[in-house]
Image (cartoon, rainbow, N blue to C red):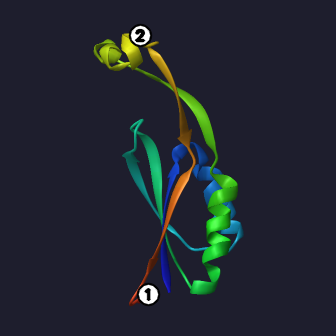
Amino acid sequence: MKLILGIAHDRDKRRLFDALIESGVKFTTLASTGGFLRRGNTTVLIGVEDDQVEAVVTVFRDNCATLEDYVSVPQEYAALSAFGAPINHALKVRAGGAIVFVLDVQRFEMY
């Protein structure tokens, strides 16, 4: 038995949920916030048998995409730029997507 703990960007959650439901996967969600951009995320908890792990990971991979986004850089960080060159106040970063952890479960009970 495995516990899949997936953290997906809120932008992808509806598509992810629909794909998990279509695959017959039962899951629990938690609203979460974090990461570099402090944007909304959804944490998904899924208990599966060992042979189902790859299918669930594929659902995450197929439904949670990264994108390029821009974040504001405060003026006080301008001195940290290479060679003292001024920092543009918008910095391009990759955002979104999903992080998936697969953990061993010693015991699982459902009531």
- For disc 1, the marked residue is 110
Q: Mark 1 Cα within 10 Å, few/some/many (few <14, many 20+)?
A: few
Residue drawn 60% across the image and 32% down it: 68
Mark on residue 85? 2
- Closest to the camera, between mark 2 and mark 1, is 2
Q: Give the amino acid at mark 2.
A: Ala
Residue at disc 2, secondary structure: loop
Residue positioned most to the top:
86
Q: Position of residue 33 (x, y in %)?
A: 38, 45
Question: Which one is earlier in the sequence, the residue at label 2 or at label 1?
Answer: 2
x and y percent of residue 95 in the render? 53, 39
Residue drawn 49% across and 81% down? 2
**Residues at circles 2 and 1 in contact by the CB criterion of under 8 Å:** no
Distance CA(mark 2)–CA(mark 1) = 59 Å
Q: Position of residue 42 (x, y in %)?
A: 47, 53
Left or right of 50? Residue 108 is left
If the image is split into quadrants, where does the C terminus sit? Answer: bottom left
Q: Which mark is residue 51?
A: none
Please state which amino acid type lies under the numbered disc 1.
Met
Q: Residue at x 56, y 29 (%)?
A: 69
Observer-nearest of 6 and 26: 6
Asked where in the image residue 23 lies, by quadrant, the reply is bottom right
